[in-house]
């Protein structure tokens, strides 16, 4: 069975025969999508003029004409990515936030794809924008966002709205559903199909998705820069069966997104066909949680002996 590549999966999803014998029927083997592509919506009226939120509900904010152009261009670029192997029988399955600007972005992206290449489309409420409250008074929101900078982007909850931590919880729930769809073969047409998932969402939601998938810490999340309008990130299966941003993107791109050397090392590990254990490759992650961790139990024993020796000497 292929690696879960970051998903929270266990044997609950295997058939009884596979669970009891630790063997797998061919039909039980998980066939993972080749790519998961996260796309931010095109330029919206709210990006252009914050006062739009004072009279229009956030979920109804439309794209600008430039945003529609950006979305059409993004569709062509995504099609080029998924069709890079001309011999492959590639297909796409879309998930989209229910907001007007994301649905409009999807419509423009969809112009690049023939109907027979699209397996399906699903509106997914759990990948919607972070809730900033209801109608937003411009000056008040400026002050609130300044407070967020001091408080921390992840845990700050907007009045009558959400924090990024709240978004994390619903994205985690969406990922559980996504793994069920993959396990049950709902995203495939046949065994020869090379499936690509495209999630049309929002900047913060997409960053939280990556945080959850790759198990980044809150501090690592705080480092990340937002996506530009219609910018996308490609998580692609590497030869070792793990998804990595470094299969499609470059190290320089990851650095420009705000990713730390440790985060990039993890992506390199995921992209490698012949990997050492994660603990060996990315042991520097451990140092972020412990102050001067001991190399082994023996070093503790040696320190204890030295300390006991000092105590005995002082008593003499």
Image: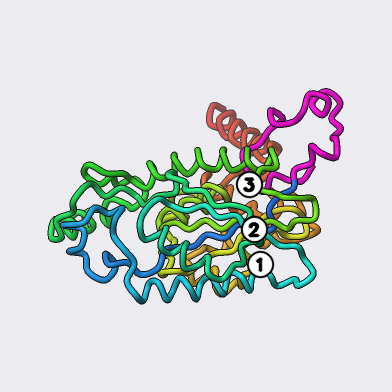
Q: In which quadrant of the rendered view does residue 177 lie? A: top right
**Between disc 3 and disc 1, whose residue precedes?**
3
How far is disc 2 from disc 1 in space, using C-alphas?
7 Å
Residues under numbered marks 3 and 2 in contact, where contact means CB atoms less than 8 Å apart: no
Q: For mark 1, give the secondary structure.
A: helix
Region in magenta: 1-30
**Between disc 3 and disc 2, whose residue precedes?**
3
The answer to whether 208 is drawn above or below residue 65 in the figure is: above
In the drawing, does residue 58 fall left or right of residue 81?
Answer: left
Residue 297 position, x and y percent, is 68, 36
How far is disc 3 from disc 2 in space, using C-alphas?
17 Å
Tag 1 residue = 82
Mark sitting on residue 196: 2
Which residue lies at the image location 40% right of the left edge and 45% below the top edge? 167
Q: How is the image coloured?
A: rainbow
Residue 230 visible from this viewpoint: yes
How far is disc 3 from disc 1 in space, using C-alphas?
21 Å
Residues under numbered marks 3 and 1 in contact, where contact means CB atoms less than 8 Å apart: no
Q: In which quadrant of the rendered view does residue 266 lie? A: bottom right
Residue 41 position, x and y percent, is 42, 63
Which residue lies at the image location 66% right of the left edge and 43% below the top edge? 186
Q: Nearer the viewer, mark 3 or mark 1?
A: 1
Does residue 138 show up magenta in the picture? no
Residues under numbered marks 2 and 1 in contact, where contact means CB atoms less than 8 Å apart: yes
Q: For mark 2, give the secondary structure.
A: strand
Residue 269 visible from this viewpoint: no
Mark sitting on residue 70: none
Q: Residue furthest front?
A: 115
For the residue pair 162 and 27, the one nearer the viewer reads as: 27
Tag 3 residue = 6
């Amino acid at each position: 069975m292929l690696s879960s590549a970051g998903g929270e999966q266990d044997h609950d999803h295997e058939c009884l025969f596979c669970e009891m014998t630790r063997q797998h029927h061919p039909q039980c083997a998980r066939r993972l999508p080749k790519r998961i592509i996260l796309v931010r919506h095109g330029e919206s009226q709210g990006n252009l003029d914050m006062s739009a939120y004072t009279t229009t509900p956030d979920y109804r904010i439309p794209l600008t004409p430039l945003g529609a152009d950006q979305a059409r261009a993004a569709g062509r670029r995504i099609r080029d990515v998924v069709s890079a192997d001309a011999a492959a029988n590639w297909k796409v399955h879309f998930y989209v936030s229910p907001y007007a600007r994301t649905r409009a972005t999807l419509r423009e992206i969809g112009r690049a794809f023939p109907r027979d290449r699209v397996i399906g489309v699903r509106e997914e409420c759990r990948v919607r924008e972070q809730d900033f409250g209801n109608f937003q008074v411009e000056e008040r929101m400026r002050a609130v966002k300044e407070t967020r900078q001091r408080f921390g982007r992840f845990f700050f909850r907007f009045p009558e709205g959400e924090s990024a931590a709240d978004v994390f919880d619903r994205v985690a729930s969406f990922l559980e559903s996504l793994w069920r769809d993959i396990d049950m073969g709902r995203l495939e047409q046949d065994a020869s199909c090379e499936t690509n998932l495209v999630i049309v969402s929002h900047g913060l939601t997409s960053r939280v998705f990556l945080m959850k998938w790759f198990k980044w810490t809150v501090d690592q999340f705080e480092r990340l820069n937002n996506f530009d309008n219609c910018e996308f990130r490609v998580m692609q299966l590497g030869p070792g069966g793990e998804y990595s941003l470094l299969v499609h993107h470059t190290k320089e791109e990851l650095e420009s997104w705000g990713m730390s050397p440790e985060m990039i090392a993890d992506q390199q590990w995921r992209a490698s066909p012949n990997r050492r254990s994660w603990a060996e490759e990315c042991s520097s992650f451990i140092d972020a949680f412990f102050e001067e961790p001991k190399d082994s139990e023996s070093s503790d024993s040696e320190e204890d002996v030295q300390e006991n020796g000092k105590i005995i000497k002082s008593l003499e």
